[in-house]
Image: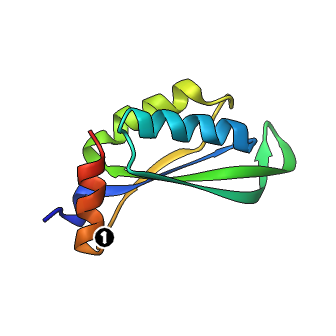
Amino acid sequence: MTSPAETGVITTTVPDRTIARQIADALLTERLAACVQLLDIESHYVWKGERAAEAEVMLLIKTRTVLFERTMARIKALHPYETPEIAAQTFATGFGPYLDWIANSTA
């Protein structure tokens, strides 16, 4: 049985679905992720002293914690932003078969 602490989610945001799909495809093909969900969002933020608001796509990337660094590096290599959001969190708890599926679906 896979421990919740061995699995987690990485989030990132990109400007459009084309880039989101490219990142998702790379992570799934390379078995760095078991699942990548794409969510349309509206982001409000301050960048270089200026307020901004833009439509973005958020990626929720399910993977094993041992793959966090490799996955984040791969996202950075594919990402168009100068300073992308790339943040990882471990799961505190989770449904055992789902956690096993994540473990079995990643390299």
Q: Position of residue 94 (x, y in %)?
A: 30, 73
Eyeballing the image, is 81 above or below 54? Answer: above
Number of disc labels? 1
Residue 10 image position (x, y, % from top left): 46, 50
Q: Position of residue 71 (x, y in %)?
A: 41, 37
Label 1 element class? loop
Q: Residues within 10 Å of mark 1 (few under 14, many from 20)?
A: few
Where is residue 106 shown, x and y percent of the image?
30, 44
At a point 31% along the width and 40% down the height, the residue shown is: 67
Q: Which residue is mark 1?
A: 92
Q: Residue at x 17, y 62 (%)?
A: 2
Which residue is more in the foreground, 24 or 51? 24
Q: Residue at x 35, y 50 (%)?
A: 63
Q: From what the image shows, is residue 79 above or below residue 66? A: above
Would residue 61 appear left or right of 30 to someone viewing this image?
right
Q: Quadrant of residue 96?
A: bottom left
The residue at the point 43 percent across, 40 percent down is 28
Q: Residue furthest top?
A: 77
Left or right? Give the position of 106 relative to 85.
left
Q: Quadrant of the N terminus?
A: bottom left
